[in-house]
Image: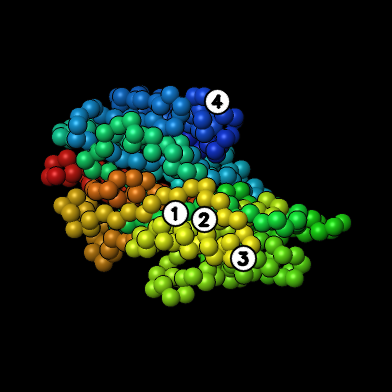
Amino acid sequence: MNYIEEILSLSMRLLKYESVYGHGGITPNAVVGKTILECHREMLNYCQSIGLTTYLDSEGMYSYAETGQADSYIAILVHLDVVPAGDQEQWEHPPFEPVIIEDKLIGRGAADDKVPAAIAVLAVKKLLDIGVSLKYPIRIVFGSDEETGFRCIEKYKRMHAPPKFTLIFDGTFPFAFSEKHLLNYELRTDIDVDVYGGESYNSVMDHVVWKNGEDIVTVSGKSAHASRPTLGENALIKLAYINSEANDLFKLVNQLFEPSGHHKLPFLKEVPEKDDVTMCLGMVRDGKMYVDLRVPPELKLATFIESFEASMRALGISPVQNDVLKGSITDVHSDFSKAVLRCYREVTGDYESQPFVTGSATYGRSYASNCISFGPRMHYHITNTHKPNEFVSFDLIENAFAIYVHTLKTMEEEL
């Protein structure tokens, strides 16, 4: 079997599904969307064809494929839901009609997280093909709700015993051992203004439309991941900056954000970690703004929430918390962490890169120990995650596949 070609083939099949929250309708067996459920079935059918045992949650919240069952098992966590495509005019090809051009696979969800899911499946397949004795069965868990609330992994945790070791294929090598707190807020105002833009909490708003009397003003920006909002250009922040005196909503935007997209939260002035706190303005619906906050885990979550909500009320905003994910810190000096880092270095020859803290929200926060976000990107890989023309390069796939096979084999033989 040519594993890389098989990864590309499976990825192309998965990328054809517009597996966005709610797409295709909500039903009792597809509580986050029928198209997401269809993508799960595509993946599970493939996993069954290569000899893995599969399971699909009755609500379509998650599924998994595994090599066997035991009290101690290795879990690989990935997800099949994706963020909306955004402004499709910015895509060179339709976002859900994946294409291969030269050495790139292009489509919404390629980097986040369907190609990594395909790599996980084929890495396990190779272990079976080369006859590795699996002391720990391997279970690949496919989530449905990673982009919109993590309810999928929370249900999985309620229903199944925790793994002994957990690898999340949704990040950057060598690995993230700590993740920030994540909070989603709806910021309500009584301001009467007809302005609409953005598609999700966790992407920088790349378009906004303002109906100002008889005039319609449209502003375009540049999308970016919510954990790095200053890498994008927020359309509403641009609009508010140019029209700062037009209405009270725009005045509030200018009180909350720098033109760069960095926050202006006043209660953080004396906090050493203030520059590591991010606030992404993801959507606006009339007088309501929707923001995504990422907060270093060293800051006490309850204290931050109290201070943030008080600061919003002082501005005349009613903050409504829609989601909160507590951050995490895994022991970077454990035998598990040291073994994973050694495997990464043995394959890549990179002895300079170190484990790190990430602002991204991944399943890496799911378990208190032996749980890390492990690739598949190298630090130099550009993937346009959450942006138009999202892609993965062939060298990313080849590199990650080699690292994962070596790491899983080592874990089975040495841990």
Residue 214 is situated, as x and y percent measured from the top left of the image, at 87, 56
- Examine the rendered structure and indicate whether residue 89 appears above or below residue 259: above
* Mark seen at residue 27: 4
Q: Are marks 3 and 2 in contact (CB under 8 Å)?
A: no
Q: In front: mark 3 or mark 4?
A: 3
Label 3 and label 2: CA atoms lie apart by 18 Å
Amino acid at pointer 2: Asp
Amino acid at pointer 4: Thr
Comes first in the chain, label 1 or label 4:
4
Residue under label 3: 315
Residue under label 1: 182
Neighbours of disc 4 within 10 Å: few (<14), some (14-19), many (20+): few
Amino acid at pointer 1: Leu
Relative to the observer, which residue lies in front, 298 or 385? 298
Image check: 149 left or right of 26? left
Say which quadrant the N terminus sits in.
Answer: top left
Label 3 and label 4: CA atoms lie apart by 40 Å
Label 2 and label 1: CA atoms lie apart by 7 Å
Residue 189 is situated, as x and y percent measured from the top left of the image, at 66, 56
Q: Residue 176 lies in what quarter of the image?
A: bottom left
Residue 335 is situated, as x and y percent measured from the top left of the image, at 15, 52
Residue under label 2: 292
- Examine the rendered structure and indicate whether residue 267 appears above or below residue 382: below
Taking the spot 24% from the left edge, 48% from the top edge, the residue there is 369
Relative to the observer, which residue lies in front, 54 or 104? 54
Under circle 4, the secondary element is loop
Q: In front: mark 1 or mark 3?
A: 3
Comes first in the chain, label 3 or label 4:
4
Q: Are marks 2 and 1 in contact (CB under 8 Å)?
A: yes
Comes first in the chain, label 4 or label 2:
4
Label 4 and label 2: CA atoms lie apart by 28 Å
Residue 118 is situated, as x and y percent measured from the top left of the image, at 39, 38
